[in-house]
Image: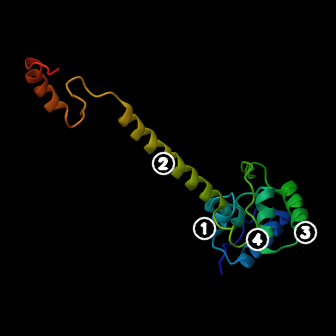
Amino acid sequence: MTRWQPLPAALPGEARHLVEHLRVLKGRTGLSLAELARRTAYSKSSWQRYLSGDRLPPRDAAQVLCRLGGGDRTRLLALWELAEQAWPQGAAEPPAEAAPEPATGAASEPAAGGRRWRTAALAASALAALLAAGLLWALPRRAGDRPAGRPGDALSRAGRSTRSARTRCP
């Protein structure tokens, strides 16, 4: 169980209620901050700021944590709206880019975003390797290099000079 630091004294009561509720939801998930970051579109440090009361979490982050923790969405959104109005100016964090929420199945939950980046990176690497191999194969050889001919070419050239001196049989 995570031992939380006390919330800042300057944090308004509405914001304090939201953060305490988010802490309870996070505890229900049984996830560490790193695991929570892997399952959501928000980093470990962002979750640390949200759960320590340093920043107002984006509405989407609160909803994702509510879903993962099995909380009451209506209650959470009411707490979030009250906290947003009371939160000290300049402490709100801009919402994350529109990232799809992970699916609810246990097999598809972990690291949905990370897997997409790894897959894209692997595909890009494979494509780069294929392009490099194709270019090396297709590039013309240097002027001094002779392309390897058929195996009998050297003999047939040598044999041509002697054959041309011979007379042909009718």
Which residue has dot 2 on it?
A: 126
Q: Earlier in the sequence, mark 3 or mark 1?
A: 1
Q: Which mark is residue 75?
A: 3
Whether residue 80 sits left or right of residue 92 in the image: it is right
Residue displayed at 36% across by 36% down: 137
Q: Nearer the viewer, mark 2 or mark 1?
A: 2
Q: Earlier in the sequence, mark 4 or mark 2?
A: 4
Q: Earlier in the sequence, mark 4 or mark 1?
A: 1
Give the structural element (helix, strand or loop) at label 4.
Answer: helix
Question: Which of the two residues, 151 or 94, is positioned nearer the viewer here?
Answer: 151
Q: Whole-Å distance between the Cαs marked 2 and 1?
A: 30 Å
Q: Nearer the viewer, mark 3 or mark 4?
A: 4
Q: Nearer the viewer, mark 4 or mark 2?
A: 2
Whether residue 78 sits left or right of residue 102 in the image: it is right
What's under tag 2, amino acid-wise?
A: Ala
Give the structural element (helix, strand or loop) at label 2.
Answer: helix
What's under tag 4, amino acid-wise?
A: Leu
For the question of whether residue 73 can be seen, the reply is: yes
Q: Whole-Å distance between the Cαs marked 4 and 2?
A: 36 Å
From the top left corner, tell me how far across and down residue 64 is, in percent. Answer: 77, 64
Q: Whole-Å distance between the Cαs marked 3 and 2?
A: 48 Å
Which residue has dot 1 on it?
A: 34
